[in-house]
Amino acid sequence: MNQIEKNEFKSRRWNFWNIQNKWAPYIFIAPFFICFSIFLIWPIAYAFFLSFHSWGGFGPLQFNGIGNYLSLGGDKLFRKAAWNTVYYTVGTMLTVLPLALILAMVLNNPRRKFKNFFRAMYFLPSITCVAVIAITFLIIYNKDFGLLNFVLKKLGLAGDYGWVESRNLVKPAILGLMLWRWTGYNAIYFLAGLQSIPQELYDAGKVDGANSLQMFYYITTPLLKPIIIFVVTVATISLLQIFTEPYILTGGGPANSSLSILQLIYREGLEFFHLGRASALSFILFIIIFCVSFFQIKKLGLWEE
Amino acid sequence: MEKAKEFLIYLLLIIGLIITMIPFLWMISSSFKDVGEIFNYPPSLIPHILKLSNYIYLFSEWGFLKPILNSLFIASTVTLSTIFLSALGGFGFAKYNFKLRKPLFYILIGSMMIPLQALIIPLFILMKTFNWLDSYYAVIIPFLVNGFGVFLMRQYIVTIPSSILEAARIDGCSEFRIFLQIILPLIRPALGALTIFSFMAMWNSFLWPLIVFQSSSKYTIPIFLSNLVSGYRGNEVYGVILAGSVVAVIPIIALFLAMQKQFLSGLTLGATKM
């Protein structure tokens, strides 16, 4: 090997390293993008495609235009499921989030004792398996021997409510489960936000003679805004996809009064094999959630690296 | 006045605490009750006679060991792969300046906006095409790595000074070895947080395993228990169900209490760093 060859070898070796450097990041991020394309992008595209057809799972596809979408507009069950899902979403937000904020403000007091203990205990429900918890609540909500009716009776109320049997009570019963499960979870976020507000601002407010309501309105709320946006959007996204709670507590009944959109998709697609229709529903749900997420990520400035 | 207010606040905190704990306490105590006593009226919070029969039946008659092993196998496989591949991807995004980084990073963020649950129908058809229905592949492969994990890891790895990596490169360290021997040890706290998130999500997941598993030998714990509820097997089975619920819930609570600090800091990192 003469000198020239040696140099060439060296430079090739250098090139090899260079190439490796150049391609390394692509190789490192490849597993994610492979998984992403197959299990997220393809299903979206396929749902979109299938939503213009009617298909029972086998045989040829039948082109149906926007028939699936049009038929949803007049569909009573779809309207009911949509209304129920909105009920769960708005209802949970209006009960869980204010309560979580109050809890966080109570725990944020520097003189508060056992703060970490309370925080951890209130958080516990959110990490448990929702299916398992729903089963436990099913027994607690039981009309004849459930714990809830027993306690209500002790408090001097009627105590014979059919929590999961009555059309009027079933949605509030599900909200009760939500309230139990998610208050502590959201309080953690509010608490993190409250702790990042410097105490001096409140001291200054006090000097200026502001009362606690004014301080809440003029200091806490604006500085808590990013956390509020985060919490509200996360709650919206997960509540629009509610499934397990009504599935286990009631199966969607009585008379579909607790049926959620995702349950309707499950039913249409996997029980009746109306795959085109179920795909149209899936695509609508996907677009709505995507928009909420987009708003969240844009508002919170996640785009900036 | 101030004292009365403080007293009231603690009183409310304790009432809230009791309401939060009652379902757990009731679940645990009833799992040790005789079947008849669970449906006794008035309900008792402490069993009259402490009985282990529900737990014994759960394992001997109902074969609960299999769902436990299924849940453990699925959750740990997915967790191991998620933390490894997320860290790898996060490293790629955090420490390299490659041509397509920006657009690919936007796609990564975009991927977090996609709700998997809304896509069950096309995913189900895809699984059918792959012939993965009723197989472990269907609950493992689609979850090997996700955008949230990669993003979270990227946020951590960005804070590691690049000079360490340069020094290693000059010593002739390959890119993959830099990842294994420098990056991974440095991001251990982040890996801890992601481990808990991912394990918990898989251990608790319900809808997807419900869709893809048909034979009972594949059932995970939540599917197994919900199947017992909907099977109309009469009231006798409720003692067994509650015992199973305790087995499903307690390990997660123990994991949380043991790693509370890491868990809660990881949880709020996403929200406060934005």
Image (spheres, coloured by chain):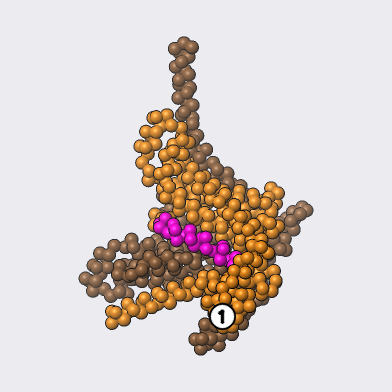
Chain colours: A brown, B orange
Q: Is residue B255 magenta?
A: yes
At horizontal 67% and vertical 51% (from top left) the residue drawn is B135
Expressed as whole percent of the image width and height from the top left, the position of residue B198 reads 52, 54
At horizontal 50% and vertical 34% (from top left) the residue drawn is A23
User: Is residue B22 left or right of B161 when viewed as pictured?
Assistant: right
Expressed as whole percent of the image width and height from the top left, the position of residue B19 reads 47, 75
Expressed as whole percent of the image width and height from the top left, the position of residue B137 reads 64, 49
The one of B259 and A270 positioned closer to us in this rendering: B259
The answer to whether any part of residue B23 appears in the image is: no
Chain that bears disc 1? B
The one of A203 and B5 positioned closer to us in this rendering: B5
Q: Quadrant of residue B68?
A: bottom right
Tell me the magenta residue range. B242-265
Expressed as whole percent of the image width and height from the top left, the position of residue A231 reads 45, 63
Q: Quadrant of residue A167?
A: bottom right
The one of A28 and B251 positioned closer to us in this rendering: B251
Q: Is residue A121 magenta?
A: no
Mark 1 sits on what residue? B43
At horizontal 41% and vertical 63% (from top left) the residue drawn is A189
Instruction: Give above or below for B179 relative to B196.
Output: above
